[in-house]
Amino acid sequence: MAHHRILTANIEYDDQRQIAAYEKRGGYAALRKALALPPEQVLAEVKLSGLRGRGGAGFSTGMKWGFVPKNSGKPVYLIQNADESEPGTFKDRLLLERDPHLCLEGMIIAAWALGSRWSCIYIRGEYAYPAVCIEQALAEAYARGYLGKNILGSDFSLDIILHRGAGAYICGEETGLIESLEGNPGRPRIKPPFPAVVGLYGCPTVVNNTETLAALPWIINNGAAAYKAIGTDKSPGTKLISASGHVSRPGVYEIDLGYPLLEFLNNECGGIRGGHRLKAVIPGGSSVPVLRADELAGVCLDYESLQAAGSMLGSGGLIVLDETSDMVETALNLQHFYAHESCGQCTPCREGAHWIEKIVKRILAGRGTAADLALIESLCGQIGGHTICPFGDALITPVLSLMAKFPEEFSRLIDQGLDSLVRESYG
Ligand SMILES: Cc1cc2nc3c(=O)[nH]c(=O)nc-3n(C[C@H](O)[C@H](O)[C@H](O)COP(=O)(O)O)c2cc1C
Ligand code: SF4
């Protein structure tokens, strides 16, 4: 199946980072077109396209923009979320490094539609090289009149600044990000109010993922109907999938939404490495439930199909695990990450994340008991739905889904551990 190249059409060109090459391949034509339209029409086009946020939740972009109050008398802020820290997710990086002007052009179009005059790209602290690429692109865009005062001779003026994070995963959560931008520790806020109404400095703020914004130039150039015609009815367009783990060809691939997951693994990723058998996939970054190989027949890479299968498309970070994977070790690896990244402001998350890690570690070491499994479930029950931000639900997902899908691996370690304890005690 041939896939549309909406986001990655030019990433193979080494000169694409330079503004002259970007313009030569049609770059900034969409911005000219958008500026000739009233902002409301650009917003309507984005709504019609059915574009859904690519940061994880898959919420309608046009609808989110529509929540920004009109004529509130306050400035509207637009933030590009390039914090990309979800384990298994490395798709925005490709765009930031290989086509930074695409990320800027989409953002300028969004700023026009939203009436934003000051915008910010919040980039993951570890993304030092992508930050350099964006810095250079910003300087070029200012020099060419795509940013700054009276863009392309219009009465629209916009400044974009680049802000580098400091290595905290939670600053990818939009309100944690906003706190961090304000100079505070990145601790998420209680919602509502949602940022579209009360965001940065108490003003209406739209936070959009890099990939979401990068789709806008194509939508403006080709029209909402053309975008909607790609993918599935409820999941239109293309999606970047970052495939990692035990495949022959890991990497970032652009697919039409609705593509069968097993075909993706075989065709794009070259199948499972070294002739091994597929054991499981975590399809949307570490925060979504694992699916066993035997559950994947007929499952497609789109929001609805993965949800029906009991997981989520999330950020499109597809982690592939072959038969050599130990699922208790996998659980420990992920729980260690979440214990480390809790921002600490909610007790269930701050305390529970470390408890879960400790118990899984005990099971892996052969010192667990059957009561530990019940204890993990009870702890997760006290965390899920009882925290300020969705990190609490995210942190319980790996261990709960791995325990549910591979119970025998947990109980085998517990049984073996008890056997060896008995042997040690009675010689
Ligand atoms: C713990 C946590 C981490 C997140 N990390 C990111 C991230 O790195 N990048 C991102 O775009 N969205 C991330 N999100 C989602 C954002 O809160 C927000 O929904 C997203 O940036 C909205 O953009 P979109 O509508 O274009 O998807 C995260 C959410 C949570 C709960
Ligand atoms: S759930 Fe965890 S990460 Fe989110 S606000 Fe509470 S303590 Fe912080």
Image: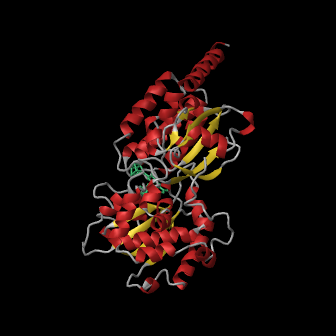
Q: Quadrant of residue 310?
A: top left
Q: Position of residue 229 (x, y in %)?
A: 46, 53
Left or right: where 51 falls relative to 82: left
Q: Position of residue 97 (x, y in %)?
A: 61, 66
The residue shown at (51%, 75%) is 29
Query: Looking at the image, which is closer to me, 152 or 375?
Result: 152
For the C terminus, which image quadrant?
A: top right
Q: Quadrant of residue 53?
A: bottom left
Left or right: where 159 falls relative to 193: right
The answer to whether residue 347 shows anywhere in this view is: yes
Pick out the residue farthest to the top: 426
The answer to whether residue 61 shows anywhere in this view is: no
Depicted 11 relative to depicted 353: above or below = below
Q: Position of residue 350 (x, y in %)?
A: 42, 46
The residue shown at (24%, 72%) is 72
Q: Position of residue 21 (x, y in %)?
A: 63, 75
Depicted 120 relative to depicted 233: above or below = below
Left or right: where 347 falls relative to 269: left
Colour setup of the view = secondary structure
* Count of labels in the image: 0
Query: Looking at the image, which is closer to me, 276 or 303?
Result: 303
Pick out the residue farthest to the right: 274
The residue shown at (50%, 71%) is 105
Tell which quarter ligand 1 is in.
bottom left
